[in-house]
Image: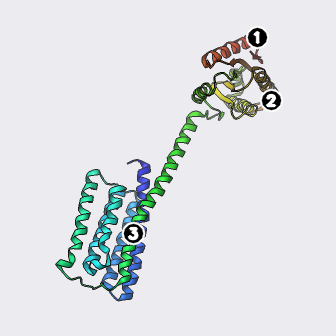
């Protein structure tokens, strides 16, 4: 069974068992007041059964707990009608058992069909009790007990539906949160906490679909001589450089911009709805900030520079824009590095 469905059933059973247990405690007190101690003993036994069912359900055996709850409510209904007759309305409790059993509980389709067929038979059997015999305890004039059973039946039906709605809503919220968490994990680079290449593809689709005519600025950025940093100071120092560069990129761009780790020591910056002149100024500010930054590592204080290749997107052709960025990036590398080539 799916873990969320099992949680839903387990939670429902927990509340149902607790409600049934409290109900029998109250009825036990009421019958003790009336002096009918046989029924007090039966209610005490019912409470013990519900306590055992509670722990079975808590252990995760929801199907066994469901069967016990169903059988116990049905037996309670039969016993109460046998002892007091139909005037107390206890026979309707088989319907209380039928509703969750058929709609919500952990039964197979065949089992649910059998339950749906068997419980109305039990109801009709109880309705025929007055024809077959006289109940041991005459409660025909006990208005309190009659209304109590009737109200419990109605409230239990409302409880079944309401609790199902509440649990379903909460589990749906949990599922949505899990989906968001999974999506976040799959779209975020764990080291730099920037978007990754997968996330960039989604961003490109949205960028093109929103408005292809609005200019955007693309820039591929590569940390110069990054391999030398790793070889000289170690990979931990390299990770510090990557994380700090990522922070500088993040701090110098808008929330609507894309900053992602494109691969290794390479980053992609996309500035949508931005003119090429403004984009150049932003990228130059980023380059200068990284050039001026001191990266403190355990081995030494490290200085690095970046080289970037920028291009403008005006016609929605993402592939061409990235190709132009790549070409400009390599030109910058050949021409001395530490520059943004447009």
Q: Are marks 3 and 1 in contact (CB under 8 Å)?
A: no
| Inter-mark Cα distance, 2 to 1 | 22 Å
- Image side of residue 10 versus residue 64, left or right: right
Taking depth in this image into account, of 121 and 40 the one nearest to the observer is 121
Tell me how the rendering is colored: rainbow
- Dot 2: within a 10 Å radius of its alpha carbon, few (fewer than 14), some, or many (20 or more) residues? some
Which of the labelled discs sits on residue 154, or is there none? 3
Taking depth in this image into account, of 214 and 10 the one nearest to the observer is 214
The residue at 43%/57% (across/down) is 164
On the question of residue 138 being in view, the answer is: yes
**Above or below, 137 relative to 251:** below
**Above or below, 174 relative to 184:** below
The residue at 32%/78% (across/down) is 88
On the question of residue 72 being in view, the answer is: no
Q: Position of residue 270 (x, y in %)?
A: 68, 25
Identify the residue at the far left of this view.
132
Location of the C terminus by quadrant is top right
| Inter-mark Cα distance, 2 to 3 | 71 Å
Q: Position of residue 265 (x, y in %)?
A: 66, 24
Q: Which residue is mark 2?
A: 293
């Amino acid at each position: 069974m799916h873990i969320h469905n099992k949680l839903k059933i387990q939670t429902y059973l927990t509340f149902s068992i607790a409600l049934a247990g409290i109900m029998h405690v109250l009825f036990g007190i009421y019958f003790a007041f009336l002096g009918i101690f046989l029924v007090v003993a039966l209610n005490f036994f019912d409470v013990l059964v519900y306590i055992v069912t509670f722990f079975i359900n808590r252990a995760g055996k929801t199907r066994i707990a469901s069967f016990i709850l169903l059988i116990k409510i049905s037996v309670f209904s039969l016993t109460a009608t046998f002892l007091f007759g139909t005037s107390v309305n206890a026979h309707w409790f088989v319907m209380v058992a039928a509703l969750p059993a058929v709609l919500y509980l952990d039964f197979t389709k065949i089992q649910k069909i059998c339950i749906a067929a068997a419980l109305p038979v039990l109801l009709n059997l109880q309705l025929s009790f007055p024809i077959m015999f006289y109940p041991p305890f005459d409660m025909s004039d006990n208005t309190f007990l009659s209304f109590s059973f009737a109200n419990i039946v109605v409230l239990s039906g409302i409880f079944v539906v309401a609790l199902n709605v509440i649990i379903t809503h909460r589990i749906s919220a949990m599922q949505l949160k899990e989906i968001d968490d999974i999506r976040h994990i799959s779209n975020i680079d764990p080291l730099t906490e920037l978007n990754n290449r997968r996330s960039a593809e989604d961003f490109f689709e949205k960028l093109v679909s929103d408005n292809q005519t609005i200019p955007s600025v693309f820039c591929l950025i590569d940390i110069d001589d990054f391999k030398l940093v790793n070889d000289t100071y170690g990979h931990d120092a390299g990770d510090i450089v990557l994380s700090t560069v990522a922070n500088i990129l993040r701090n110098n761009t808008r929330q609507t911009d894309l900053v992602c780790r494109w691969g290794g020591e390479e980053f992609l910056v996309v500035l949508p709805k931005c003119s090429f002149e403004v984009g150049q100024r932003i990228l130059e500010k980023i380059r200068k900030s990284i050039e001026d930054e001191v990266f403190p590592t355990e081995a030494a204080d490290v200085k690095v520079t970046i080289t970037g290749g920028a291009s403008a997107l005006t016609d929605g052709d993402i592939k061409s824009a990235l190709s132009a960025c790549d070409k400009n990036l390599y030109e910058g590398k050949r021409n001395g590095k530490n520059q943004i080539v447009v």
